[in-house]
Structures are given as structure tokens and as C-alpha cells.
Amino acid sequence: MQRTPAPHTDPTWEDLVTAALLGTDRRTPGAVAPGRDAPTALLDAAAVETLRRRAGLRPARAARRPDPAPGDPRPALPPAAARRLAQLLTDRPGTVGGSRRGTAPDLMELLPQWLAAANAHGYAAPPQSLPALLDAARGRTDLRPAALTFAGERALWLARLNPDWRFALRSTPGGGAALPDLADGERVRRLWEEGLFAERVALLASIRARTPAAARELLATTWQTERAEDRLMFLDSLRTELGEADEPFLEQALADRSRNVRATAAELLSALPGSALAGRMAVRAGACVALDRLREAPSLVVEAPHECDAGMERDGVVPKAPAGRGERSWWFGQLVEAAPLATWPERLGGRTPQEIVALPVTDDWRGELHAAWCRAAVRQGDASWARALLGVPSAPEAGGPGAVSLAERARLLGTLGAAERAAWVAGFIAAHGLSEAFQLLGMCAVPWAAPLGGAVVDALNIARDAGSYPWSFSGVMGLAERCLDPAEAGRLDGLLAPPEEPEDASPGAGGYWSEAFQRLVTTLRLRAAMAAELTP
């Protein structure tokens, strides 16, 4: 019986791709005969199929034209400032061999400061600079808030057209959607109940900034049906304008199903010194710390809790200690951190914060107690306790009697006013040099006040004259370029020449210091020019 030959079928594109990947010696699709000529035949078949695929495409309907970009009513940049922006977005700092930067300013590091100044003046971004500005913000998350503020609504218009810039939609509350008039209760309610999560967050934040009670009441209407992660984000919005009226809502949140929500509610309540939770924590912490008057000099005695009971856990105490941390000290630190600082003068004989911090603490509990007081001072924004814990900047123990780390010192400084903060850091540098000051300098307002700027320059000059290893000061030097008052440029001219190197100086130190100071002076003068260009 003669077999009927199978009907011939042209190979599909998938067949051709598979044969090309495996090789024609292992597989040949239909219409390609095995043998030496198979590779050529395969390419011919692929060419024919490519032409067929292209010819068979139906013309698509033209896409709808995008809506015109919105206008920007803000005043245009002065021409010199617009040229400067283009330079900041395109230029890169020069380098001179190895890791040395030479004397050219780092223009990209000046862009955040330029954007802040432009936003302060209320200028609109030049349309031709928006793509480069969005590209810069895409690569640097720290630029995004200022860059998007400067770019305005047009940045969101562009972001909807280019996937590379979609971060602008994610970074803008509500994805750039317009919020309803807050006086329109029906539209507000509909957006809150039906809107996207980002839109709801933006709505809640906007209402909270204007009418805190209305935001809390709106949140309460859907609280029970929200997802745990959403409840956490919404609860965090109550930090704005946090007040006593929020206490009943936060007390209810202490019984939430989510541990993170409970912890956040407890943290917010502990920031209200008059709350019931703060009172409960004051009783617990007060039972752990007592004044021992039997010793020759009064001292503090600590008796940490022996268990974390259900009440403590409900009030936000985390029962499980981190690895390497004792449970009792862990619970104790949380109790003291959450207790109102006003508890301690009353409990410890009417002493001031400075007198309390100066008291000896028995059995090596001093570090734990003072660290908890540091966290409490930051949480409660208590400047008097922050001063006591920082101590005088010239104290032999750098940072004072209560600070246990540079990070703690920096956070304590954040509770002080800008002038006091700068004066304290200037005194610290004068007494202890720059080796530990970098993190503290980051807490000071820009431009640095004259005493602080003078202390930094004097310390750099001392290190230069001593022939110190210069590259260890590159971080502070870079910070000075961005933060030193441009008016200081004139007094730095005497430091531009290479210094005489002591015998024990690091090789090449003099040349580095000369380059660094030249770059510092050039950058300060450039910042002065930038400010002048932005001035209306």
C-alpha cells in the first residue's frame, strides 16, 4: 500500500528560530532539506518569512495625540541662571590622576543647592531643561523632591509619556492627580472610598495639614476595613499636627491586629506627655529608677523589669530582645524612652536635667539609662534635656555625659535651634578637631554660621600645617564646599599656596592641600555667582 505524502507546510517563525538555535545538523524545519546546504536554506527561509510577516501587518490606527502640556504661571528664570542650570546638568568635575579631584568644582553636588534657591524664588523650570532635569532626578533620589517642585506640572506630563520618568508619578502624592476642593464633602468622600492608594494618602495628608480633626474623622470611617500595611501608612500621617485630641483614636489603635500598627500608635502616644499611655510608662519607668540617699553622694539605682507583661506589650514594648541584647535591659530602655521627661525632676528631688544627668548610676546602668533619655529627648523634642545630655562641647568625653554615639549626638542637636546647634558644633570642633565632626556638621543649617565656618576653616588649616594625612579630610572639605558661607572665600586666599611640609608629613600632602583649598575657594565664588544670578 502506497503511503500518501504529508501535505507540505511552510515552517513557522518559531520553527526557524528553534532550528537556528539548535543547529541544522540536529533539526531542520520543513522545506529545508538536510545536508551541507541546510544553513543557507534556513537563512533563505527566514528571509522569506520575515518579508511575509512585515508585509502581512495591518496598518494600526494612529494614536490619539497627547493633551498639550500645562502652562506654568511662575516667572521665568533669569537668562544667566538658565545657562547655569544647563551647565550644572551637563558638566562633570575634572579629575587629575588617580582619585584626586583637582581644582574644578563638583557641579552636580551644587545642583541640590541651586534647586533649593530657585524654588525659594518661585521660578519656573525652562522647558528645554526638563528632560535633563528628570534624567538627573532619576539617577539621584535625593534630588527628586526639589527637582519635581521646580519642574512643576510639566514634569508629570512628560512622565506619562516616557516610562523612564515614571518615578515622578510615584514620587508625587496622588500620582500627580488633582485633589478635589476640600470643601466639597461628597467628592472628598468618594475619592477616599474609591481612589487609588496614592490618591488617598495625598488626600489624607492635605486634609491633616489644614484641619487635623477632619483628617482623623475621615480615617476613622474606613479604619476597620483597611489592610494592615495601609493602616500603618495612614496612621503615620497623624504625626502632622499631633495633639491631645488624637489620643482616643490612638488608644484604640493599641489593640490593632498588626504589631507594626500597635507600635506606631504607642510611639505617637508617648510623644504626647499628657496621654494616658505616657502616664502608664512614667509609673513603670519610675519604678525602675530610684535615688539612693544612703551613699555618701546621691546616686541612681536601677532595677530593670523582670518580665514583659501583657500591659507593657499592649503599650508598645517589644518583648523579644535583639540578638546580643539582654531582655531586662531591652525592656528597661523602652520604658524610659516612652516616659515623659518631666517625670524625672519630680521623682528625683526637684533636680534639673543637668543635675540628674550628672548623678552617678550604680551597677553599670549609666549607659543604658542615658541612651534611653537621649531617645526620649529626641522623641519629645525636649531641648533642655538635649542640652543636659550633650553637655558642654569642650568636655573631655566628646559629646557630653549622656550621648553614647555620634548618631545620638546628631539627633540631640536636631532639637536645638539653628544658631545654638552651630555654636555647639563649633565648640566641639575647637576642642576635638574634625575627626568625629562630620556627622554633626550635617545637622547644621546651610550656609554655616560664621563661628562654625571659622572653626572648620581653622581646623583644616591646623591639619594642613601639621602635614596630616590629607585624604582623610576629603569628606569635610567636600561638605565645606557646599555649606561654608561664600563670604568666607576672601579669608582663604592665604591658604592657596602649597605649605611647607614637615619631615613627618604624608608624601604629596602639600600639593593635595593646595588643590583642595583652591577648589574650595573656586566653589565658594561659584556659589556666590549662582546666588546673584537667581536674585530677581
Image (tube, helix red, strand yellow):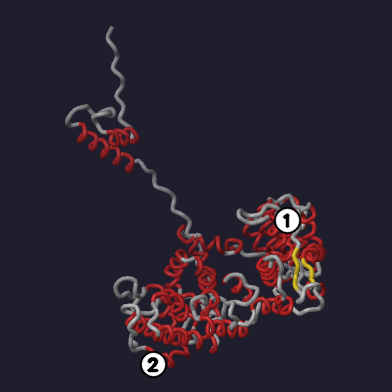
Residue 338, quarter of picture: bottom right
Give the class, few, some or many, for how many residues have Cα within 10 Å of label 2's Cα (few <14, many ≥20).
few
Q: Judge from the rendering whether residue 111 lies leftward or rightward of residue 250; answer left or right.
A: left
How many dots with numbers?
A: 2
- Tell me what residue is drawn at x 61 percent, y 85 percent: 419
Query: How far separated are the C-alphas under marks 1 and 2?
Result: 59 Å
Residue that mark 1 sits on: 262
Residue that mark 2 sits on: 494
Q: Earlier in the sequence, mark 1 or mark 2?
A: 1
Q: Nearer the viewer, mark 1 or mark 2?
A: 2
Give the class, few, some or many, for how many residues have Cα within 10 Å of label 1's Cα (few <14, many ≥20).
many
Relative height, residue 45 to residue 477 (above, below): above
Do we see residue 209 in this rendering?
no
As helix, strand or loop, the secondary structure at mark 1 comes to helix
Q: Amino acid at mark 2?
A: Gly
Q: Judge from the rendering whether residue 34 lies leftward or rightward of residue 177; answer left or right.
A: left
Residue 512, x across and y down, in percent:
34, 80
Relative height, residue 377 to residue 158 (above, below): below
Q: Amino acid at mark 1?
A: Arg
Residue 218, quarter of picture: bottom right
- Tell me what residue is drawn at x 67 percent, y 63 percent: 203
